[in-house]
Amino acid sequence: MIILSSVMVEIYAIKKVPEKEFEKRKMGLLDFLPPESAESINTFKKPEDFQRSLLGESLLRALLSIKTGKPAQTISIKRSAKGKPMLKDNKSIHFNISHSGDWVVVAVSGNEVGIDIEKIRPPHYRIAERYFSKHELQTLNELQDEEKKNYFFDLWTLKESYLKLLGKGLTKSLGSFTIARTGSGFELITNSEKDETIHFFQMALDPNYKLSVCSLSSEWNEKATLITIDELINKMNDGKKR
């Protein structure tokens, strides 16, 4: 069995394609999925939701096929009680998926990982008043205009990535912990103390998006690996032959 050689975090990204182009290729991806996964994806009514879901599931399975040496269609993925996806029979590979707008991203690591991507748009700062910690809100309100908007999405994606690492979703209050900016990045503060086990990093995938990752690993690839839909189909086809 092929497994990750280290705990390094790898980030992969795929961009949505025009609907007419996607229509020509979607069956080429659906055919590689287990029947239950294809059935679940087919429940999405909106074309953009359908495409993002199919690209995410396909990209994840292609990567897991490479990591495990198993055919993509045979890989068994289960979910925790809170909905976090994980391999059913392999605890040495961890992964997480996120999508927003035109992008779908997947993080894979030998350690626990969470990832979140959000399209930058006019923020609703009342959300910050409700969900951010006092320290985060104070820091945010010291900023103005574009800097304030960008920092809002920094905090939002960083906090989401941490919750996704934990697998707790919004069952853990967003205001119960603090993401603090440092000279070199960000750190997690819980119970007034820095958590040295948690590491955050961000990637400049697209100037219109924020991409944040949270991991128990301090090692990661500095750039995301971009995959086209045709490359994905080829990878899935290779995975089917394993």
Image (cartoon, rainbow, N blue to C red):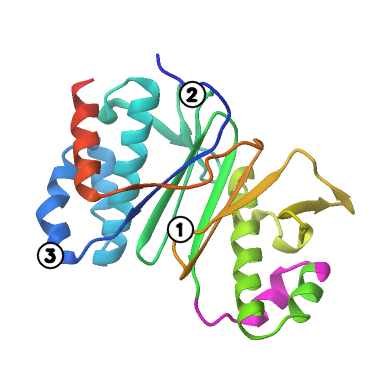
Q: Is residue 43 left or right of residue 220?
A: left
Query: What stretch of residues is rendered in magenta?
Result: 121-135
| Residue 167 appears anywhere in the view | no
Q: Residue pushed farthest right?
A: 192
In the rendered image, residue 203, in percent from the top left (x then y), is placed at: 53, 54
Q: Residue under circle 2?
A: 4
Q: Amino acid at mark 2?
A: Leu
Residue 141 higher or lower than 152, as above or below: below
- Residue at figure coordinates x 27%, y 58% from the top left: 50
Element at badge 3?
Answer: helix
**Label 3 crowd bin: few (<14), some (14–19), many (20+), radius 10 Å:** few
Q: Residue 113 — which label?
A: none
In the rendered image, residue 187, in percent from the top left (x then y), is placed at: 76, 52
Dot placed on the residue nearer the N-terminal end, 2 or 1: 2
Q: Residue under circle 1?
A: 205
Dot placed on the residue nearer the N-terminal end, 3 or 1: 3
Tell which tag, 3 or 2, sits nearer the viewer. 2
**Label 1 crowd bin: few (<14), some (14–19), many (20+), radius 10 Å:** some
Residue 179 higher or lower than 141, as above or below: above
Q: Are marks 3 and 2 in contact (CB under 8 Å)?
A: no
Q: Amino acid at mark 3?
A: Lys
Magenta stretch secondary structure, dominant: helix
Residue 203 lies in the magenta-colored region: no
Q: CA distance from mark 3 to mark 1?
A: 25 Å
Element at badge 1?
Answer: loop
Q: Residue under circle 3?
A: 20
Dot placed on the residue nearer the N-terminal end, 3 or 2: 2
Residue 134 lies in the magenta-colored region: yes
Q: Is residue 118 left or right of residue 59?
A: right
Residue 1 higher or lower than 54, as above or below: above
- Residue at figure coordinates x 90%, y 54% from the top left: 192
Q: CA distance from mark 2 to mark 1?
A: 24 Å
